[in-house]
Image (cartoon, rainbow, N blue to C red):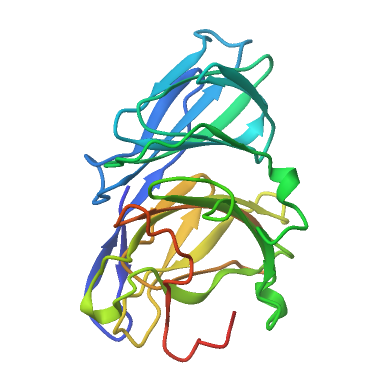
Amino acid sequence: MDFKVQIPMSDKQRVVEAFDAVPVVNKREEIINKENSTFRFLSLARIVLNPSKDGYGPVRVSTSNEEIALYVNRGSASISADGSTYELIVGDVLYVGINQQAEVSTSDFCDISEYRASDCNTSYPVQFIRHKELEKTELAATVGSKRPMSVRTVFKLIDGANVQACRLLFGDTFMAQPGGVGSYPPHFHGPDGPHGFGDDAKEEIYHFRVQSTIEGDTPYVLQNCSRPGEDVGVYTHVFDEQAINVTDGYHDTIAPPAIEFMFTWCLASFTEGRRDWAEVLNKPGYNDEW
């Protein structure tokens, strides 16, 4: 469901890769893969299980040269991997490395996002990250305090400081108030800027959960899709349960005043082992906005 956006002060249009991320009950549903996107490494699937609905059964997930992050959006899940069973609630993550299998089940209901990075060559163990244990640590950063509208908490659930991995970096972001500006300032994970993607570049997916404080309203956020070298912003509407490829340009997110939103984000480094958050290019003029 790619979006077409108009380039300001131009008659040119740009296609932005966007995806309907609505899951299917009692099924592993692929959302983003190499066949429907330009991603080299990243993919996204959803696993929603409900024992009270027809077709329920545990879902098995396997890897070859891939690593995955299993994140609980809603409900609770039991995930078995490498001889152990882990009990996950909302916000928790299980990292599963290459050449492994995992089985997902639930006693009630679970909604899981599966982020996957391919072309991985180093074996790391299964690692369990509890969202609550990151609160009030350096991996739960309150940022954007220079502008109250951009105050948010960024949870780095899979980071070089707490999880061994090949390419993956993953987390979720929660805004402090409705109408907030997230993923700010506009930044780019090139980081070679107008010259293209270098060895330190990273692909990235945003997946949004959006709601309105106005009854009957259809909520959305505005996602910047401008590219390095452009003087203007190129924004597109993103609605609830949509995911977007923000790899090849500056990105920030703006919500109308009545909108509350959060999003998960996942990056995959172009070079295995280069998982440094500092390799970011800010849009010129925004260097002091963090």
Give residue 193's position: percent from left, percent from top.
30, 78
Corner quadrant of residue 71? top right
- Report if residue 26 is visible in the image: yes
Left or right of 142 in this view: 249: left
What is the quadrant of the C terminus in the image? bottom right
Residue 207 seen anywhere in this rendered image of the structure = no
Determine the residue positioned at 34% across, 74% down. 191
Question: Relative to 95, does residue 185 appear above or below in the rendering?
Answer: below
In the displayed image of the protein, which residue is found farthest to the bottom? 285
In which quadrant of the rendered view does residue 60 lie? top left
How many discs appear? Answer: 0
> In front here: 187 or 98?
98
Q: Is residue 184 above or below residue 60?
A: below
The image position of residue 136, as x and y in percent, is 78, 58
Above or below, comparing residue 108 to residue 6 in the picture: above
Is residue 226 left or right of 14 when viewed as pictured? right
Q: Residue at x 39, y 37 (%)?
A: 67
On the image, the x and y values in percent for residue 282 come to 44, 80
